[in-house]
């Protein structure tokens, strides 16, 4: 028997960095997916295969002991840890540690880009292996198991990435509490700089600035919190789609300016953001910690033009949208 499951990437729509200070954030699943197939094997061991990767920077091959990447080898070991911990955790939940499991991975999500690639592979692995072992887990339960995996691998985690990947749609987060917001379509273009920053270092940099100048940095963080709540009102409100797009685009631009004021943007990120706006995006901003990684743009009816502008500016564009579905079982059979 083989079970295949998939889980989406995520973006932080609004509220990165200020969320560290107890402010709210809104994250959303996007329609870039990691696919994991799981089947039993005869040797009682965990085996991982990775193949058919089309996007640069992702897993490209697997041998008995190592996963290889086109770019950052350190990320290979991290993903391997996520997959192994996910399988072991599910086998413990099912009380079937003796069963050997082989998983195969393909992915559309760039590794190390701030799009939740590790959480997506964990959630998809948990979904596939739990179904293979006969566990009927809800999406919420799988998100919680994904959070446990992150804690085991990283030592700390807000749980945003696995929760969004498991549940799909829009998630409002504040101080450990999650709320699923109503779904709305958002035609997006994600732009990848090809590099990544250290979340830990960037968070520490903002903290140092806050401690040095709380009277200056505090209002920036407060503004970001108010901005998130305004975005929530827009998403849950009764305005038509075009009005919502226009208002959310304005908030994206303001949020990017606030993040730039905190010092977490880079020359390349700003180049992609402004290229997207010039090409017709209603709004564009960093997503995630900054220092590299990705930006995203809201581009109704102009996704192709915005993607071209991002490519000309030196980024890798990915045309996508909000994913209504989180974890999805793609198939089960012999």
Image (spheres, rainbow, N blue to C red):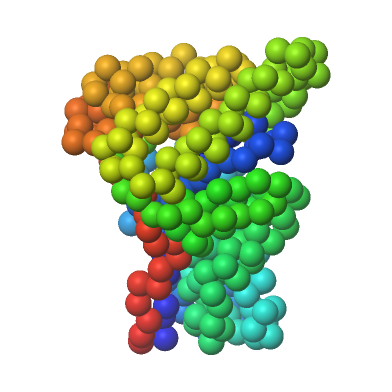
For residue 200, above or below residue 155: above
Q: Is residue 74 visible?
A: yes
Name the residue nearer the viewer: 326 or 80: 326
Q: Residue at x 46, y 79 (%)?
A: 39
Question: Where on the picture, by quarter, is residue 199?
Answer: top right
Q: Residue at x 75, y 14 (%)?
A: 215
Question: Where on the picture, by quarter, is residue 300?
Answer: top left
> Whole-percent x and y of residue 68?
49, 49
Name the residue nearer the viewer: 243 or 199: 243
> Whole-percent x and y of residue 179?
57, 55
Which quarter of the figure is the N terminus placed in? bottom left
Q: Residue at x 50, y 35 (%)?
A: 230
Question: Where on the picture, by quarter, is residue 271?
Answer: top left
For residue 45, above or below residue 240: below
Which quarter of the figure is the C terminus placed in? bottom left
Name the residue nearer the viewer: 67 or 277: 277
Left or right of 22 in this view: 90? left
């Amino acid at each position: 028997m083989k079970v295949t499951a998939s889980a989406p990437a995520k973006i932080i729509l609004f509220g990165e960095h200020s969320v560290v200070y107890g402010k709210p954030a809104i994250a959303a699943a996007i329609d870039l997916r990691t696919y994991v197939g799981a089947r039993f094997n005869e040797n009682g061991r965990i085996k991982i295969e990775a193949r058919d990767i089309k996007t640069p920077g992702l897993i490209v091959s697997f041998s008995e002991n190592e996963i290889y990447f086109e770019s950052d080898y350190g990320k290979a070991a991290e993903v391997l840890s996520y997959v192994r911990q996910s399988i072991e955790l599910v086998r413990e939940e099912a009380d079937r540690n003796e069963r050997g499991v082989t998983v195969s991975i393909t992915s559309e999500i760039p590794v190390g880009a701030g799009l939740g690639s590790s959480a997506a592979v964990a959630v998809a692995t948990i979904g596939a292996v739990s179904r293979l072992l006969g566990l009927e887990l809800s999406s919420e339960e799988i998100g919680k198991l994904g959070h446990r995996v992150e804690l085991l691998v990283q030592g700390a985690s807000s749980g945003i990435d696995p929760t969004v990947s498991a549940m799909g749609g829009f998630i409002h987060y504040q101080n450990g509490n999650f709320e699923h917001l109503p779904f709305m379509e958002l035609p997006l273009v994600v732009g990848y700089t090809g590099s990544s920053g250290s979340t830990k270092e960037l968070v520490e940099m903002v903290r140092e600035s806050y401690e040095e100048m709380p009277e200056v940095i505090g209002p920036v963080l407060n503004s970001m919190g108010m901005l998130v709540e305004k975005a929530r009102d827009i998403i849950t409100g009764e305005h038509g789609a075009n009005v919502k797009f226009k208002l959310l685009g304005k908030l994206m631009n303001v949020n990017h300016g606030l993040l730039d004021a905190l010092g977490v943007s880079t020359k390349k990120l700003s180049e992609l953001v402004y290229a997207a706006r010039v090409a017709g995006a209603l709004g564009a901003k960093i997503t995630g910690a900054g220092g590299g990684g990705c930006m995203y743009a809201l581009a109704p009816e102009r996704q192709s033009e915005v993607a071209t502008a991002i490519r000309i500016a030196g980024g890798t564009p990915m045309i996508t949208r909000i994913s209504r579905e989180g974890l999805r079982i793609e198939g089960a059979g012999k």
